[in-house]
Image: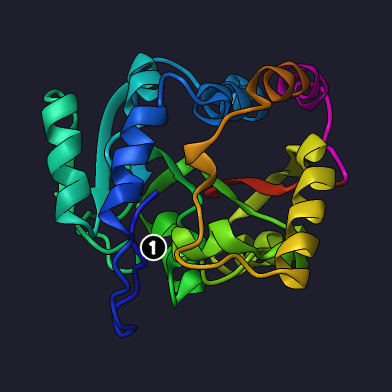
Amino acid sequence: MSRPQGDTAPRREMQLEEYSRIVDAEHRHWWYRAMPKLARAVLGPRLRPGMRILDAGCGPGANFTWLREFGEVTGVDTSPEALRLARARHPEMTVAEADVTALPFADESFDLTLEITVLTMVEHDQRAVDELARVTAGGGTVFLMEPAVPRLHRAHDEVVRSLRRYRLDDLRAMAGRAGLVVRRATHANSFLLPPAAALALAHRLRPPRGEPGSDMARDRLGGTFSALATMERRVLARRDVSFGLSAIVVAERP
C-alpha cells in the first residue's frame, strides 16, 4: 500500500503507523500470507522466470519477496518513508520515488506491471491505468487488484486513505480504455463479504470513536480466513468468481 497519489490532487499522507503495521504484519497476518498466493493463482502461466516487473505503489516492499522469483523487480511509490523501508529491507530491489500517473520509464519497459490496492488512493485512476499500460511491453500483462463493493466503505478505508471501492465492470472498463485486452476479470476474497458487511453496518449504526482502527492490527480469525482463502484459490486457478471483497483484472498489452 502507498499514500494517495495523483498529480494535481492534494497529497493525503497515510499514517506512518500504518506502514509499521504493514511491515509487522507481513509474516504474521493471514492477508499478507495469502495475497501472493492469490496473485499467483490468478496469473497462472503468465508468471515466468526472467521477467521485467514493475510493482506500482510498492510501499515498504511487501511484494518483492515473492516477485523476485520471476525476475528483476522495480518498485515505485510516492512515499519517501515507504521507500526507505523498502531499500533497507530489500537492498537488491530497484526503487524510485514516482507517481503512478506519471511513471519515469520508457514505453514497453516491463513484461509485468501490477498494482494492488493502489488505484483506490489515486485521484486520477484512469490516468494511472493508462501509464501502467504504456510501460508494459507488447504481449505483457497488467494486473489490477482493488477493493470491491462500494457500499462497504468503512473505517479501515479511512485509515489507508482509500478514495473509493470498485465495481468489477468499472475496473474492466478502465483497462479497456487504456487499450488493454482483458483476459480475466474476477472477484476474490468472497468469504470476507459477510464479515465486511456486518462491520460496515455496525460502523454506520455506531461510528467508531476517535481514530478508526486498522484491520492489520488484529488477526483473530486468521486461521479460518487462511483456510477459506486456500479453498477459494483452488477455484480461482480454474475459473472466475462472481462475487467477493476484491476485484481483479488481468489484461494484456496488444
Which residue appears at 28% of the width and 68% of the height? Answer: 102
Which residue appears at 20% of the width and 35% of the height? Answer: 86
Residue 209: % across, % down: 55, 67
Label 1: which residue? 131
Residue 149: % across, % down: 75, 60
Looking at numbered disc 1 in the image, what kind of residue is underneath it? Glu
Residue stretch in magenta: 229-242
Count of marks overlaid on the render: 1
In the image shown, does 11 or 135 lie closer to the viewer? 11
In the image shown, does 121 or 22 lie closer to the viewer? 22
Classify 133 as above or below 95: below
* Extreme-front residue of the structure: 209
Location of residue 64 (image quadrant): top left
State yes or no: residue 43 in magenta: no
Label 1: how many Cα within 10 Å (few below 14, some 14–19, many 20+): many
Judge whether residue 52 can be spotted in this image. Answer: no
Classify 26 as above or below 145: above
Which residue appears at 16% of the width and 50% of the height? Answer: 81
Location of residue 151 (image quadrant): bottom right
Classify 190 as above or below 135: above
